[in-house]
Amino acid sequence: MAAMLQNSHFERIPFDEKLSQRFLDDYIKDLDSNRLYFTQVDIDGFNEKYGQRLHKMLMQGNCVEPATEIYRTFEKRVESRVALAEKLLKEEKFDFTSDETVMRTRKDAPWAKDEKEAIDLWRRQIKEAVLGEVLRRDLLTKLAAEHNKPDPGKGERDPKEKISLRYKRFLNSVKDVDDEDIANFFLSSVARTHDPHTDYMSAREMSKFKDGMKNELVGIGALLQAEEDGATKIMGIVVGGPADREGTLKLNDRVVGVNSLNTGKAEDMVDIMFMKIDKVVDLIRGKEGTSVAMKIEPAGGAPGETKIVVIQRGKVALKDEQASADIIEMKGEKGVPRRIGVITLPSFYADFDDGNVRCSVDVERLLDRLIEEKIDGLVLDLRNNGGGSLEEVRRMTGFFINRGPVVQVKTNLGQVQVKEAENGKPIYDGPMVVLTDKSSASASEILAGALQDYNRAVVIGESSTFGKGTVQQPMDIGRMLPLFAVRNRAGYVKVTIQKFYRPSGSSTQMDGVVPQIILPSLTDALEIGERYLDNALPHDRIRPAADFKPADPQLLHLAALKEHSQDRLKTNKDFSYVIEDVLKAKDRIKQNKVSLNKATREKELSEEDAIQDARNVERRERFSKISEEDKKNLRFMKLTLDDLDKDGPPREYDPAAENAEYMRKAKDENADLDDTPKWPSGMDPVKRESLSVVRDLVDLTENARTAGLHFKANEVR
């Protein structure tokens, strides 16, 4: 792995004492990110013993020794702190009238200087956990009384007992590791010191990565959640999946044991109480056609009641992660409706093994159908799209531009390769908006950046995208091992081998893609993006691609679009609420402290509740009017990949209705106590504004055509 990093990583970082210290710092941070368990004495000892020589130990093949020593020290500290928590929870009568505080985050705080200071720090952490749980219970009781409904917290465990179980689960997860797990933790830290996206992946993690890329897995089709008392709860069942077809497993059932091989032998039933959720998932998944047996405590059953459920594993398509489309018909001026197509793409997925699943093929099918339905404008929603296949985004960009450069890729040797769109002409050349947020990353930024560079689309969204401008390649470490070594468990190193650049020559690294129309967002107060990650590579530029020929920017009518959007934002109450919340969040983050005085906390919560209640009153009245207007002026039609297969007309639907199309989910027990009104027609303010922008663009484009201008993709200035 060390050799592969040195030879393949984009930055060619030298293996020296400086990098060695980064290995150590990242590993410690990964174990104890909030600086609650180790003390400064521990850190000084690790630095003195390993800070300057971990790189040599890695090259010599004996780095697992320090990794294990540090992890076992961490394990001892966790055992000690959890034992202290148990003692405090049993014996301490917490005083919630003092002026004590704790930090909201300790990521930059000094380590406790010694064990005495660590104990006092831990006492306050436990005190805050108990106070937080007490306040949560009080709030549930208050809301239940206001809504004349049963108190959902009435049957819950005592707050101290609940906190105790929470730490018991954490301790169990820390202890439930073997030497291979520790090696994985350490090697991942080694990889991440090169940049945030270089990583070590075990064979199991690589399998999950491939499943995620092709939106498919082999299992039972159930959504699992770890419960504080140690069990694993069924929170969702995939419609049409193996568990749904078998029919015995129900929502809110609790799994307490798994026989992965379904041998029928009691001794093969693995007790999964307090087991890490990813290990529970591994036990339940397996080869297609095999069966898994689970010991279940049925939802609503008698205490202690259990039954065995056997389900045959099968392929589960993650359909809610597939591309889909809507057609929104909006009444326009003079009664002429505008038909807006909205394509939602959660990721740039692809099956790297067989090539049977490709998001570009799915989007092309949806786009063709939208064109058949005679859409006037298009919104491409890339919010929360973290990227994926570089080949898929290259191909997809070609749906909207003429043949030309899509992305430039630079290797660690400085060589630049230009990847072009291969279509002779675009599939869709009409008015277009791309919707992004801080979670739009990598391939999403390539697509948004290229369309922005070509003046082909208006990008609208949060202040920037994520800022990931690097390309990773998974490499099989087993191939580098000696001939007779055990290769199947060596894992992979996912190495950053290239940086990518927009056709204009600007990297998306760090800076991301800045929309032409920026909307207020709560993320403005949060440290989200590449620039906040450790060891991120810098932003830079190269020369524009040789054949890059942008269209005339006047075709986007940006000045008019921005003016219209700003006029709407000035009177939009929801965006004004966002701005208020951003200012308060920034102030809280700056202060970085939480009071341990119950009266103070209750006052803070009461003030927040009063603000929220006032907003809800205002919103209910306003949303009711908007909903009525939507019924008169909007018509919604859905197009999924399954709908395309059926070849019928687009089906009308209510976007405000609960969607159990792909997965039935367990109801949140506290949802009925939240009287915050839902967005009218299921559209949040950002999506609603994007529709207004694309409608404006359609109108302006049509007016320009009438005046003798032509909207044409890639028209050269």
Image (cartoon, rainbow, N blue to C red):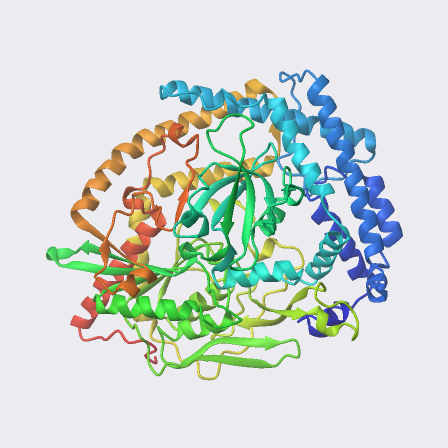
**Residue 388 image point, x, y percent:** 51, 65
707 to the left or right of 559: left
Q: Residue at x 82, y 58 (%)?
A: 63
Quadrant containing the N terminus in the rendered view: bottom right
Query: In the drawing, does residue 584 fall left or right of residue 591?
Result: left
Q: Which x, y percent locates residue 90? A: 70, 19
Residue 520 visible in the snapshot: no
Residue 393 location, x and y as percent?
45, 70
Depth check, front residue: 504 or 150: 150
- Locate residue 359 relative to residue 467 in the image: left or right: left
Q: Give the residue at the far left of this rendering.
A: 334
Q: Quadrant of the C terminus?
A: bottom left
Residue reaching furthest to the right: 49
Q: Nearer the viewer, residue 517 or 255?
A: 255
Establish if 663 lies above or below 201.
above
What residue sits 30% from the left and 72% below the top? 428
Between 344 and 45, the one nearer to me in the picture: 344
The answer to which quarter of the image holds residue 342 is bottom left
Report which quarter residue 197 is drawn in. bottom right
Determine whether 223 is above or below 58 in the image.
Answer: above
Residue 547 sits in which quadrant?
bottom left
| Nearest the eye: 558 or 121 | 121
Question: Is residue 153 among what the camera can see?
Answer: yes
* 246, above or below 700, in the image: above
Q: How many marks?
A: 0
The residue positioned 81% from the left and 40% from the top of the image is 40
In the displayed structure, 187 sits above or below 470; it is: above
Position in image of residue 13 (x %, y %)? 74, 68
